[in-house]
Amino acid sequence: MTHLFIRSDATISMGTGHIMRCIALAQAWKKRGGVVTFISHCPNNKISNRIESEGFNFVKIDKIWPDIQDLKKTLKILNNFSYNKKNKASGSYNWVVLDGYHFTPDYQKNIKAAGFKLLIIDDNNHLDHYYADIILNQNIGSDHYPYSCSQDTAKLLGTKYVMLRSEFLMNKHIKKTSPATVKNILVMMGGSDPDNVTLKIVQAINKIDDSGFQFNIIVGPDNPNTTCLKDASQNQFSKINLVHNADMPEMMAWADLCLTAGGSSCWELCFTQVPFVTIVIAQNQMELASGLEKSGVSLNLGKQETLKQDDITHTILSLSCDIKKRAALKKAGIKIVDGKGTKRIIRHMLDSKLILRHAGVKDIKLLYEQANDRKVRLSSVNSSPILWEEHLHWFKKKLKNENSWIFIAENSIGDPIGQIRFDKKNDLFEISYSLDKRFRNLGLGKVLLEVGIKIIKTKIHEPVIMQGLIKHDNIASKISFENCGFTRLKNELDISSDANYFIYQLLIHPTKQLEKS
């Protein structure tokens, strides 16, 4: 798998949100076997330490764009890590991700001109033009943005592409039950909170004459206001804890209600099923906060500049005892964030243009390793391991058989992701396919079947039946076949004598003469 370079920054003024959501994408890339390097201006060592603790490379730069030193050093780093921009073994291109409002079209053009694939993470369509292979905007309503870009640019728009870090995807952190009344309230105003909105919230909390509440207030790694927050939290009825170096999934699992800035944390709260209220602490958060409120996902208290302490106090008290309203917010949040966003993004980066080529002698080892994968064996009619000598004899025989077709599936950058085989027996084509373990659970089974059938369909001269034999417990393959229009035979028509298998069939019609390529 190829190299992923992430160019993003974290400062007091811009916050840590860009970096943190990029970590989610980096985790998904690494899980697929790839290498990740962050290139960043990040004065706070806590952020760089976090990146390195994930097993990613971290390269620091001192100046940020529009300072020309940024671009010069970034290109130098990219070229030092890359071998002619391509992976020498596979001929596949490396990717660069840009996440930050300061990366102008000129900056983008220079990255593209250097020969890299480019993904731009955007929030508000603020540029005149985008020079990207992929534009990613995970926000509500982004599908209506008229992005100016090449007609070949893929646009991944909407909440189905929300990026969640792996620590949030664990089921234990999802708060599935709601208490009748709120006890635990979480407050988080971002990684830096330059305008010290947290202090206004603490002062509002101090007006609550109720010892039944407990507040955990997150103090981000770039927040310079610790001393005054500590002083303000001393005298009050409600219990306030200032939390540094927070385990955010654990904090959300603890919370019954949350007050949050209108940034990426909103998506994490949706997924962990915590009802929340947004406060806009930066202009670029206004659209997200408004969109969430219109969708019934949260309450929006508006811009922090005009927000009054009494409004915060009233919202906490009223929402804490309104279980129906909190349940409605929670239900709406579940609908828009399913936790599969990073998988979908990686698929588009690596697998959006799946290509089939005929297998040859050079693929014998590749097919042998795929066939002996543990999950492939468990899903096969014969689950016993395959010996090399058996595979060698079988493969040579298949290559000579004019009624057998074996295709290697590759993604758009040349990585082999699986194989599919068609064996013709009279008017029946038996189908067998498998995916490399790095590329499972991405919906590629359906894509592989569709592309394979399309190729075979152009080669037949009379109607034929496509048939797949699937184990009962192979849920993924059953879904893939059904999504491609296959129908499962009824028991009395099932030609398999083994009750552990289903037969799926599809009638297809020809488009031209059958040929053996």
Image (cartoon, rainbow, N blue to C red):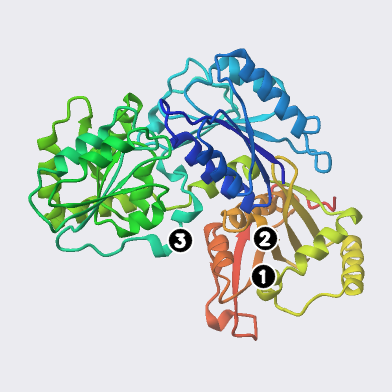
Residue 247: assigned label? none
Location of residue 266 with respect to 370 vertically, above or below? above
Q: Amino acid at mark 3?
A: Met
Q: Residue at x 48, y 49 (%)?
A: 165
Q: Amino acid at mark 2?
A: Lys
User: Which residue corresponds to mark 2?
Assistant: 437
Between residue 161 and residue 74, name the one nearer to us: 74
Separation (CA) of disc 3 from disc 2: 20 Å
Residue 213 horizontal side relative to residue 468, left or right: left
User: Which residue corresponds to mark 3?
Assistant: 170
User: Which residue corresponds to mark 1?
Assistant: 375
Q: Mark 2 or mark 1: name the one nearer the start of the chain.
A: 1
Element assignment for label 2: helix
Q: Amino acid at mark 1?
A: Lys
On the question of residue 232 being in view, the answer is: yes
Q: Residues within 10 Å of mark 2 (few under 14, many from 20)?
A: some
Q: Mark 1 or mark 3: name the one nearer the start of the chain.
A: 3
Residue 323 horizontal side relative to residue 175, left or right: left
| Disc 2 and disc 1 in contact, CB within 8 angstroms | yes
Element assignment for label 3: loop
Between residue 108 and residue 445, name the one nearer to us: 108
